Image (cartoon, rainbow, N blue to C red):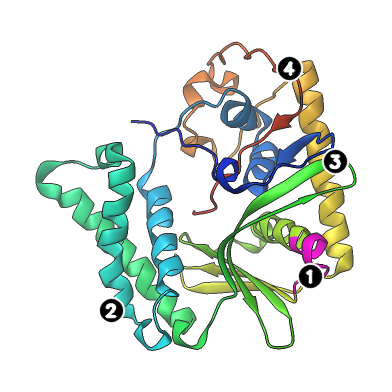
Amino acid sequence: MSVEQESPAARVGTPVDGVDVLGALSPSRAGDFMTCPLLYRFRTVDRLPEPSSPEAVRGTVVHKVLEDLFDLPAADRTPDRAEAMLEPAWDALVEQEPTLHEMFDAAEGREVASWLASCRTVLARYFTLEDPRRLEPAERELYVETLLDSKLLLRGFVDRVDVAPDGAIRIVDYKTGPSVSERFEGKALFQMKFYALVIWRTRGVIPAMLQLVYLGNGEILRYVPDEADLLATQRKVEAIWQAIRRAEESGDWRPSPGRLCSWCAHQAICPAYGGTPPPLPEREPGPVDQDVAAESD
């Protein structure tokens, strides 16, 4: 079972007229390249389909409930109401992607029931971290993009943007997995700094707070960025893009074996594990426009 979806950015992105755009990059695709250039190639150049996982789909469903929760009047944003929204969100997703049921053992729906119970646990944990009755987000699932002077287009989706009465901006991202160790905090914050950079360039305001909400173990990581942070993030993003372009030109997409390999859907065709990648597809003329993946892990 595999699902290949249209890039959300293809539906909501705006054309950049009269500008020779080099290409586009999202934080998820930049993260792929930093993790493993060959993984980036498989996902972005070859566009190989990947099977959906219960963990990834849990993220999608929980994100949808948290997005829709704020459509309700403040007094109705309760744990019971959120739990009642869970199965309809799952049913709506299955209606769009019927093969999602293949993730589970169909025998009496036992696996689906267990998985839905895990979704309820994660969703209930949200209410121990924030009180949505006291929040009025300015934006949810916000698509953002900006064109750098280097003609690289940055784009992505922000789970939530809060704006205080004084104009201060907080960027919030939900993670349905557990928090990372201090060793990997920088990688986790890269995505948030990427979003902060885009918002700074589009709105002229440096976000006052970046907030990662880890629903897997009930922790919140907060970070206060400054101009130096965001300029460093811009340099890093442009360096990643230059490295991607060099790999495109040379055809040298090297694997980077590590602890995440056991989760990779493409291990069977990875040379690090004795596999053989498929031939590279013919490059189309013009800039490469990378997909924006939803950050719903």
Q: CA distance from mark 2 to mark 3?
A: 47 Å
Q: Which one is in front in this view, the residue at disc 2 or the one at disc 3?
A: 3
Query: Does dot 3 land on a helix, a strand or a loop?
Result: loop
Query: Is 42 situated above or below 285?
Result: below
Numbered circle sitting on residue 225: 1
Q: Which one is in front in this view, the residue at disc 3 or the one at disc 4?
A: 3
Q: Amino acid at mark 3?
A: Lys
Numbered circle sitting on residue 80: 2
Q: Nearer the viewer, residue 162 or 230?
A: 162
For the point 64% across and 39% down, the residue is 32
Residue under pointer 3: 151
Q: Which one is in front in this view, the residue at disc 2 or the one at disc 4?
A: 2
Residue 137 magenta? no
Residue 191 location (% of width, % of height): 67, 55
Residue under pointer 4: 251
Q: Are marks 2 and 3 in contact (CB under 8 Å)?
A: no
Q: Which one is in front in this view, the residue at disc 1 or the one at disc 3?
A: 3
For the point 50% across and 88% down, the residue is 134
Q: Is 82 left, or right, of 143 in this rendering? A: left
Q: Which one is in front in this view, the residue at disc 1 or the one at disc 2?
A: 2
Q: Amino acid at mark 4?
A: Gly
